[in-house]
Amino acid sequence: MAATSKKRDLTKMKTPHTYVIIFGVVIMAWILTFLIPAGKFSTEEVAYQDANGETSTRTVLRQDTFRYDYALDKSFVYDQLEDLANDPAELDELGIAKADVEAVLAEGEANLTQSQLDELSLTDDVLYDMYGNKIYATSEKLHKTARVWGTDDFGGFGFLNFVFEGLVSGDKYGSAVGIAALILVVGGAFGIIMRTGAIDAGIYAFISKTKGLERLAIPLLFFAFSFGGATFGMAEEVIPFSMVMVPFVIALGYDSIVAVTVTYVASQVGNAASWMSPFSVAVAQGIAGVPVLSGATFRLIMWFVITALSAGYLSLYAERIRKNPLKSAVYDSDEYFRTHIEKTAEEQKPFLLGHKLILVEMLAVLIWIVWGVTQKGYYIPEIASQFFVMGLAAGIIAVIFKLDDMGVNDIAKSFQSGAADLAGTAIVVGMAKGILLVLGGSEPTMPSALNTILHSIGSLLSNVPAIIGAWAMYIFQSLFNLVVTSNSGQAALTMPIMAPLADLVGVSRQVAVLAYQLGAGFVDAFTPVSASLIGVLGVARIEWAKWAKFQIKMQGFFFVLGTIFIVIAVAIGLQ
């Protein structure tokens, strides 16, 4: 018996905490930077017609400007500065004062640095355009490897500071600090809403009146969230929706894995097969030089087929869990929700007017959010503000109608506890972003191992058959999305390379866009670097490792579907 118990304990240890997994990935990313030299690209502004027919611009890399990170060839550059100082026409064209150049020359060749040249507006990109690789001492490729410990102010970035650096990276419009803040505000808002009891009472009332219709809920919800992903790139917006959907789906007899799949995964299925998403298809087509929203008929058919098959896949799993809940990998963690739901059912809480008003108010705010995102371009700051309004209004209604004896202080306490529940999830968002920082970041103009990987893959794919090339593009985009999960960011980094590569391989650029969107969309439902996924998993109380065991099978299913549509697109010559 003792041996058996010990074996069971070892089995439990096979599921590491999400923090442990991410730290392991950080270590691997750090080791990778010792092996892969850093590289960089120059960039340019590309103008294209967006989904509204207006001219937009996007900063993209120039695929023919890749070079490894080399030390500056001071002798060559110093000689060019001397020639430049005696060329008034060239100085005037560059907008540089002769006195400034002479001041740098006076410092001496040995003291010449890129920082001095930057002050003259002779940036690395400018010098490379003028003289090519001659400005570098190309005898040694440099690596951009973080120190073990350090900060930007003291010794330089150290990988053991990846949590803090990840959390404060970005801005209020994106990962990581923006999404971390959104998660905390949404958590607080729903802490208030859950305290009112309105959601519990509403779920119980709905289930008691719709017995026998549970099976219809899963495919209908899947199509609804997929449509949201296809039309306006729904991703971060799913986090607050999941606050309601997780207890609702579990109350129907399923588990939290079904809840996350029917919300977040469905939205990414829609994003992957979208015919009009302004954040993925439109940007990628614009950068690739393909008419924006072209190929919509093919993509509409693809969206419907993939969504229907994916909903069917989920329904089979959901039905198996409904018949035997113990088969769920998250049965233990779902106990939190089941206990809460059972308590509500046992107490036979009445569905009061105050509860109904709060649910109506929630619906109104959700409609306001969808309208704002689709019509006004609302994003993370506005969404956070809207959900705070939702939570505050719900709390005020609860106080007025004395729901569960709530007082003003209870509103504040509930907000605090709700935010605290998701604080761990906000930390994961920062940790995940830290992986990218350890690799050197995703800026094309800054030397990084990631840029070198991007260039190397593009070179490998330049001499393969058309179908193999298109399929390899799809595989590459899927793997690239494991570390860069921003749809528009991935488009800006990869499409300037993949679009001309499609010409060399012999497939249309429309196929290159298709490979990008399928790879970028599907893998967002799996990668631990996705801030939105981690946010939804936090709401559902699912550890990423347990999620991965379920999702890896679904990713295989998605990959087969993606491969089929890539082959069809090549076969019909999709333009």
Image: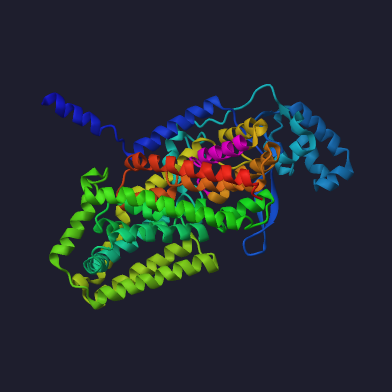
Residue 149 in which image quadrant: top left
Specify whether residue 113 is in view: yes
* Camera-side residue of 219 and 186: 219
In this image, 57 relative to 530: left or right? Answer: right
Q: Is residue 365 above or below residue 170?
A: below
Q: Pick out the residue farthest to the top.
A: 139
Q: Is residue 73 magenta?
A: no
Name the quadrant of the N terminus.
top left
Horizontal placement of 401 versus 184: left or right? left
- Residue displayed at 39% across by 39% down: 552
In the image, residue 76 sits, relative to residue 211, either above or below, namely above
Measuring from the top left, give residue 374's x and y in whole percent.
52, 66
Residue at image x 69%, y 39%?
Answer: 506
Q: Main secondary structure of the magenta part?
A: helix
The residue range painted magenta reads 467-486
Q: Residue at x 44, y 39 (%)?
A: 162
